[in-house]
Image (spheres, rainbow, N blue to C red):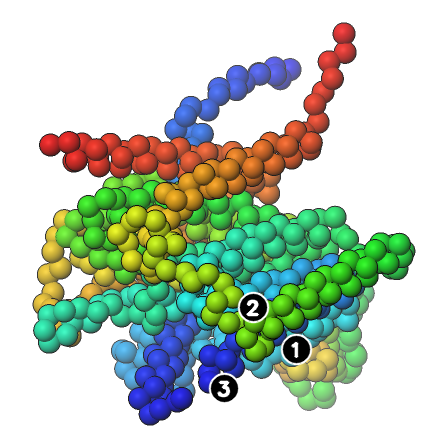
Amino acid sequence: MAKTRVLKRIPLSLSERTYLPQIVTGLKTTFSNMFKEKVTLQYPEEKPSIPQNYRGIPTLVKDPNGREKCVSCQLCEFVCPPKAIRITPGEVPDGDVSREHVEKAPEEFEINMLRCIYCGFCQEVCPEEAIYLQDEYSSSGYTREEMINKKDKLYELGGTLPDEHYKWDNKKKAELEGNPH
Amino acid sequence: MLNLELLQVLGLKIFFAFLMVSVVMTFAGYSVLAERKVSAWMQGRVGPNRTVLPFVGHIPFVGSFLKGIGIFQPLADGLKFLFKEEIVPGHVNKVYYYMAPLVALVPALTTMTVLPFGEFFHHSGKSTPLILADLEIGILFILAISSLGVYGIVLAGWSSNSKYPFLGGIRSSAQMISYELAMGLSLLPIFLWVSQPGSSIASLSLVEIANSQNASAWLALVQPLSALIFLVALFAETNRLPFDMPESETDLVGGFHTEYGSFKFGIFFVAEYAHIVIGSAIFTLIFLGGWHFLPWINDPWPSNWVGTLLGTGWFLIKTISLIFFFIWIRWTLPRFRYDQVMNLGWTKLLPLSLANLIFYVILVTWLDLSAATP
Amino acid sequence: MNLLDLLFFFFSSLAAGGGLLMVVSKHPVPAALFMILSLVGVASLFVLLEAFFLAILQILVYAGAVMVLFLFIIMLLDVGPDGGKASKIRILSGFAGAVAVGLIIVLLLHFSQQSGFGLSSNAWPEINADSFVNGSNLTFSTSVKNFGYGLFTKYMLPLQVAGFLLLAAMVGVIILSKKFRIKKP
């Protein structure tokens, strides 16, 4: 049990009651502060270092082979709390040999940045690791339409991330070796 | 009747007055910049360093240096005040609302007529002070006119017709009355001292006060308590931070200028800083030897135009360091509570300045008598 | 008419006009402001008479201190415009005003009979060195030193009496406003 300790109030001495020594001490502190190193970041020229797990603007990424990862399962659209994501599913274009393993691809993928709350649920829920909240944090536009990120914009922002699983490659390899599951 | 010579003198006076006003206003504008810069440095920031004129920024080295110290910032600030939308709230008392900023600015600018800032040496070696009007009662003039400055604040507070400005106006008037007494009483021992029997000085002129400190002790060293009381009262009269009751943005939003915007606010702002500039100049003249060199040392500069320039520059250096001190205090001390301000003024400073006065009256009398006996 | 006359008419109309507006304005705050205007006008008249010291004291004491106090009290008590409820006082003040105007007219007529309309040189006793500081070797001037010398030699008694009167008034105010607690047995 915490014990209450009553502190004795010592009456102020004469020099303390004139405030002057304390004022001088304060003045010394502020004066020495003037010559310390400045903490200001000259923002547009200098940018702060972004931590690894930062949740910036949600983006779509491609796998190291340059293939579209998103299979348009619409889980992110479902889980998105402010309903900022809208996906129009479509067919994988015929003759695209590199992507014949998947059934669907997004025809359109829109993220409304005026609604997005940067919660990162979409990244969490994505089975293909196709959507990532990366280190970009500054987005601006003149109109509401400009603030809706379209598919090409999302891929431009996302770029290519290194993949650790190669899910589809491994699956294909297993299929070829006669061990589908 | 008006003749040519009179017109010439009048024209010259008007020219000098114009020059003086523009110099003081420039100083006021740049003390705003100094305030922003010094506060930034004290808080580990950089301060304004972005504003730049079109072509100046491209000059190598010099341009970026000027940009870095924000030399063009006051220009941009002033223009911003000019071009802002002028919003007049519907509930204000229009005539007085428009009048208040002018009433605040005019006394601040009028006091500079009796403010000497150097001396001019003739060929014969005689010197005349650089001043618009060498009034014999200079210091009384300054005290009187600067006490009118409070009407701007009171008027703004009353005509805005809303709570916070009203409180600011009331506080300002109460504070002004309280500290004017201590200020006047702290100056009396100074004038007793310099015009004690036997000295050639017999007036309240600022020029003579400054000249009496030539090659002798500064009055701040002779009467440190008077200097301290005067400085504290000066902070209160200029509404600077430990005493910025009328403004106190943390509890009165913006105090008397809550309802003001655009250029009218700008005028209040400039008036406040003009008060600081002139207050610093007066403190320099009375307590820090004016344009004379260090205490007990003769002026090292020659008695010609070089000396005039150096003396004026030395005066400006002193004034600017005092302005810096004003800013330094502002970013160090927190604000007093209203009742603490009143308490300090009436129960501490006023008795202290009275005791100080009585002490010096007795001292001067004793010195006078002991000088007369042998 | 030269410049001095022009300035005299300007400042005297400022003083008189300010006084008039002070009386007729309904709200106390503008009334106080007009009074300041009137005081500044009077101070300027002192300047025209080359009595700078008096002018500055007028501004310092009345416009700078007393009127600030007036405004402070008006604003603190939040006195609004008087909505014609004091009709009796109005009659009384009208009567007082009529008497004052009558007195001024009588005085004006009295002085104008002496020599034309303006004040003659013998309307007032001439002010010279003798009448100012008796027996001192100071020449007459409006300087502060002469003023102080006169105040502390010839007019010492009136000064002390006035100071004592003010002190008595101050003590009276403190006694009236302070709440003395009555000790109950």
Query: What is the chain identity of the residue bearing mark 2?
Result: C
- Seen from the viewer's position, the closer of residues C157 and A66 is C157
Q: Look at discs 3 and 1 and give the one toward the viewer.
A: 3
Labels 2, 3: one chain: yes
Of callouts 2 and 3, the N-terminal one: 3
Q: Look at discs 2 and 3 and give the one toward the viewer.
A: 3
Q: Is residue A143 visible?
A: yes
Type of amino acid under label 1 = Glu
Q: Position of residue B218 (x, y in %)?
A: 23, 48
Q: Residue furthest top?
A: C185
Q: Position of residue C181 (x, y in %)?
A: 72, 20
Q: Quadrant of residue C139?
A: bottom left
Side (left or right) of B347 relative to A91: left
Q: Which residue is mark 1?
A: B86
C-beta proximity under 8 Å, tags 1 and 2:
no
Q: Position of residue A1 (x, y in %)?
A: 64, 15
> SS class of the residue under badge 2?
helix
Query: What is the chain identity of the residue bearing mark 1?
Result: B
Q: Quadrant of residue C144?
A: bottom left
| Local crowd size for mark 3, using a 10 Å CA cut-off: few (<14), some (14–19), many (≥20) | few
Q: Is residue A40 visible?
A: no
Q: Which residue is mark 3?
A: C1
Labels 3, 1: one chain: no
Type of amino acid under label 3 = Met
Query: What is the chain identity of the residue bearing mark 3?
Result: C
Compared to B71, does B175 lie above or below?
Answer: above
- Which residue does the image show at 46% across and 61% down from the upper left? C125
- Which residue does the image show at 60% across and 73% down from the upper left? C112
The circle drawn on residue C41 is 2
| Local crowd size for mark 1, using a 10 Å CA cut-off: few (<14), some (14–19), many (≥20) | few
Q: Look at discs 1 and 2 and give the one toward the viewer.
A: 2
- Which residue does the image show at 56% across and 71% down from the upper left? C114
